[in-house]
Image (cartoon, rainbow, N blue to C red):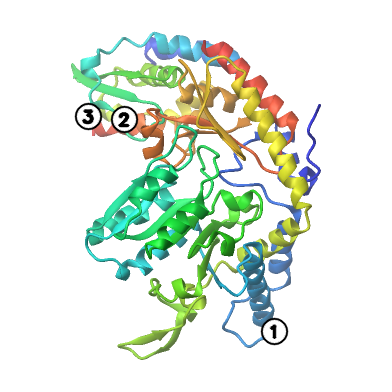
Amino acid sequence: MSLPINARTALETFTGSLSWEERARLLMQWGERLPPMSDEEKTDERLVDGCESKVWLVGDVIDGRWQFRAASDARLIRGLVALLLARVNGLSSQALQEVDLVSWFTQLGLSRQLSPSRSNGLNAVLQKMRQLAG
Amino acid sequence: MPLISPWRADFPAIDALQRQGQTYLDSAATAQKPHALIDATVHYYANGAANVHRAQHLLGAMATQAFEDTRRKAGEWLNAGASGQIVFTHGATSAFNLLAYGLEHVFRAGDEIVISALEHHANLLPWQQLALRRNLKLVVLPITDAGVIDVEAAAGLITPRTRLLAVSQLSNVLGTWQPVRQLVALAQAQGALTVIDGAQGVVHGRHDVQDIGCDFYVFSSHKLYGPDGVGVLFGRHQALAQLQHWQFGGEMVLQTVYQTATFRPAPLGFEAGTPPISAVIGLGATLDYLNGLNQSAVAEYEARLHERLRAGLMQRDGVQVLGDPHVALVSFVVEGVHNADLAHLLTEQGVAVRAGHHCAIPLISGLELSGAIRVSLGLYNDSQDLERFFTALDQALELLR
């Protein structure tokens, strides 16, 4: 199965032995590339529960494919969410339920960010996405 | 000048963590454990586990002896003397729930429960829910800018309608000692029951429940370098006599037929089911270890380390320390930097601190924050740990700003 172009770019960028500083810088850069969400769109219903930082998530189906947009008040989670969107945007509902995101973040060298003890919200974002698509 | 902990080597995990590049500064969440506890736990399991207060056989007698020895040691740790009893629960939270259910019958609609604005959820939610069940009023004592419960305001808010006061001795977010003796006196003058949350306070210095004058004092073993799964509830005899049985089963019963039963008084009547035997025995070993330390040396060392942490944070640009911390921990935020980002980068650098609301959401919201970073100290931490933290903090801030 071919990956979306953004996902391929992410894989090229985040593989290799990055130092923690390089990884953090790259995450922040990816976060900056998230298309902006207006304040009116940042409603409480769109807020993802269970995050230390605020994350808003909007999902639309265009021609049978999911297009998510997200925003966060914290920069590193914004980057992590951007990497998540790079993998899932353009998927059908069926493919979205099946996509293995643990493996995705492991390939990016970021598997620890998905561990159950992390309260950074990545897991919560994932759940909300599947809920929307369910 | 470096500050070196003479007790560091007593805690094997600290060394193990250091070999993995981890600096542990989250002891207010749970503390690392001394050899003495680990040895006692291994000894208990390797030499024969048995249930307590039941069997006639030798193993049962030995386990019961060790279990009851811990009860005595916990009473001595709090200088309970003959004033009351120690009840073992499954944690501090479980002790507060026991109180909130066991004392429910003393409340009438319209009565008031007084807590403070800085309570941990464990000493907030059981009372909040009791208030909702019984149509009571939950009165919240305000705190000063320094992070101390306002005694003057408390004097006006503790009234003849106050049936119970439940306050923390040492704030788990602000690191501030609370005027518990004064608050207890105010409550007692109104005939109210008094509950002290000693979860953080018990870890720093020695405290005397007779001197505080409270009816109940609660702490959890795992923050006091002991095993998890054990809470300690001290209750004065007269107060324990008002507590109704809450959880049923096991050896808490005196007599029963199918339709009715009678129950034991405290302590066993409140220890339904098999208690956490190995953990209680482990707590006994931890208390022996702590009793063997030079208390004034520990207190002096903790004070110096805390001062270094506080001063180091205050001298950094944009760092805002929460309240005016006295001991044990410092919570802070950095202007223009999200605490989740800072926590992320400290974790990346192997520094274990706590980020978020610290189980005190109303307090954090009241300070108009979304969260904070908390650095907390144990008696095994040293100035090198602090230097590693400060280096990591500086590097994180450089990246984020």
Residue denoted by label 1:
B58
Whether residue A18 is visible to the viewer of this picture, yes or no, is: no
Give the vertical position of B80 relative to A123 (above or below).
below
Position of B275 with respect to B31 (left or right) is left
Q: Residue at x 61, y 60 (%)?
A: B208
Instruction: Residue B323: give x, y in percent of width and height.
Output: 50, 32
Looking at numbered disc 2 in the image, what kind of residue is underneath it? Val
Marks 2/3: CA distance?
8 Å
Q: Please tell me in which quadrant of the rendered image residue B41 appears.
A: bottom right
Note whether B246 is above or below A134 in the view shown: below
Q: Are marks 2 and 1 in contact (CB under 8 Å)?
A: no
Total number of numbered discs in the rendering: 3
Q: Position of residue B368 (x, y in %)?
A: 37, 28
Could you tell me if residue B367 is visible in this image?
Answer: yes
Q: Quadrant of the N terminus of chain A?
A: top left
Query: Which amino acid is tagged 1?
Result: Leu
Q: CA distance from mark 3 to mark 1?
A: 62 Å
| Residue B55 x/y as whole percent | 60, 85
Task: Please state the chain letter of the residue tagged with numbered disc 3 in the rendered image.
Answer: A
Q: Nearer the viewer, residue B385 or B351?
A: B385
Q: Residues within 10 Å of mark 3 (few under 14, many from 20)?
A: few
Q: Position of residue B92 (x, y in %)?
A: 50, 57
In which quadrant is the C terminus of chain A drawn? top left
Q: Report the disc number at residue A45.
A: 3
Location of residue B230 with respect to B303 vertically, above or below: below
Query: Mark on residue A48?
Result: 2
User: For this view, does B349 lie left or right of residue A108?
Assistant: right
The quadrant in which residue B159 appears is: bottom left
Residue under the image location 60 percent in, 75 percent down: B82
